[in-house]
Amino acid sequence: MPTDRHPAGSATRAAGTAERCFTDFGRVPLLSTADAPEADAPEPLARANSLVRAISVGTALVLSSCGVLQGPGGVGEAGYPGPDLDLPPLDETAGPAHETERDWAIAHGTLAWAHDMGLADRPMGDVIAILASTFVGTPYAPGTLEIEGPERLVVNLSTFDCVTLVEHVLVLARLTMGAGPELLGDEREFRERYREELIRVRYRDGALTGYPSRLHYFSEWMRDAERKGLVRLLSEELGGMVDPRPIRFMSDHPDSYRQLNEDPDVLDAIRGMEARITEIPRHYIPQDRIAASEGGIRDGDIIAAVSSLDGLDVAHTGIAVWRGNRLHLLHAPLVGDSVEISERPLAERIQGFSSQMGVMVARPLSPQGS
């Protein structure tokens, strides 16, 4: 029987209207650096898969195949029926994996669905928000890029951390807007095109040349994406201020990163990268100004929660979605254990964490230039 992308055992049931779904969650891993019950962990530390503890939560409001609920100017109250994909089961006992047949079935099936729904004719932000909503319920997993051996591209759509969710949704949106459905007729060409887009998104200047070439700090990820024509940075024009703090989290915690321990040259390269990031002004919207600025943020904009931890730029990432007349965050959180849309509006959510100072905002750009 065809199934959706959600893991076996995560029961989804309709409640209220046909557009609303609830998902029941089980385990909730949480980094011990969190200072609140649902706090997010710094992404570099989360990717190192360090210091986790378990708590439990109740039922959380999310959207799955019900579609996306959006406010004025968004993707529409009716939403879209989610893709119904026939997938191999997810092996939750296996270690970090990539390029499984399940991963490619998700990528291929989601892109085919996007073309069937006519998403290529919609604005880029709508495409991002709609595609992201189809991953609600997908399991959260830290450290999915940390596989053994030298740095290589990891293609994993079966589980996400907060950054890989953003990356894969951006790749799928760019292929939706920039490649016709004929690409899906050649599986080899489709996979190669997907890999090329993912490398372009994930690595500095779109070139995979080793572990230091990965965009580990999300503020650099955003700046590099703007230079490559993938996004436009918005924080400054939305009234943002400069974060002057030096970046040095990875080099201050080399024991959390296998690659930094194994090769002193890699650690030196990371230190040099951190120095370069520090020299470039990083604008962010302080948490007490987010509500006043949210009118300038659209569905599908990329959101980065600025960390208050010493040496770290960004604590968490996600995608902006409007629900009613307020802005929310679609993200892969540690708490909840799967991709969800935040119950609280973005401004209130950020204000609830002393570990998060505000947000950075970037707007994805269509490969068609529209």
Image (spheres, rainbow, N blue to C red):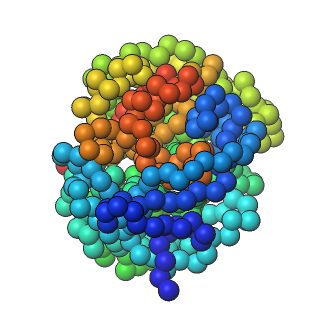
Q: Is residue 32 visible to the viewer in this orientation of the structure?
A: yes
Q: Would residue 366 appear left or right of 328 to someone viewing this image?
A: left
Question: Residue 30's image quarter?
Answer: top right
Residue at screen point 40% across, 58% down: 63
- Describe residue 339's horizontal placement relative to residue 223 as left or right: right
- Whether residue 172 appears in this view of the structure is no
Residue at 40% across / 35% down in the picture? 346
Most extreme residue toward the top is 244
111 or 130, nearer to the observer: 130
Name the residue at 50% across, 13% down.
244
Total labels drawn = 0
Q: Which of 247 and 330 is in front in this view?
A: 330
Q: Is residue 161 above or below residue 254?
A: below
Identify the residue at the far bottom of this view: 1
Q: Which residue lies at the image location 63% right of the left edge and 53% below the top edge? A: 141
Dividing the picture into quadrants, the one containing residue 65 is bottom left
The foreground one among 256 and 7 is: 7
Quick one: 168 or 199, which is closer to the camera? 168
Where residue 338 sits: x, y (%)? 55, 54
Q: In this image, 3 relative to 152: left or right? A: left
Is 287 drawn above or below residue 184 in the view shown?
above
Where residue 23 sits: x, y (%)?
A: 50, 60
Residue 178 lies, in percent from the top left, at 29, 60
Q: Where is residue 24 in the image (x, y as percent from the top left)?
A: 55, 59
Q: Horizontal placement of 299 versus 58: left or right?
A: left
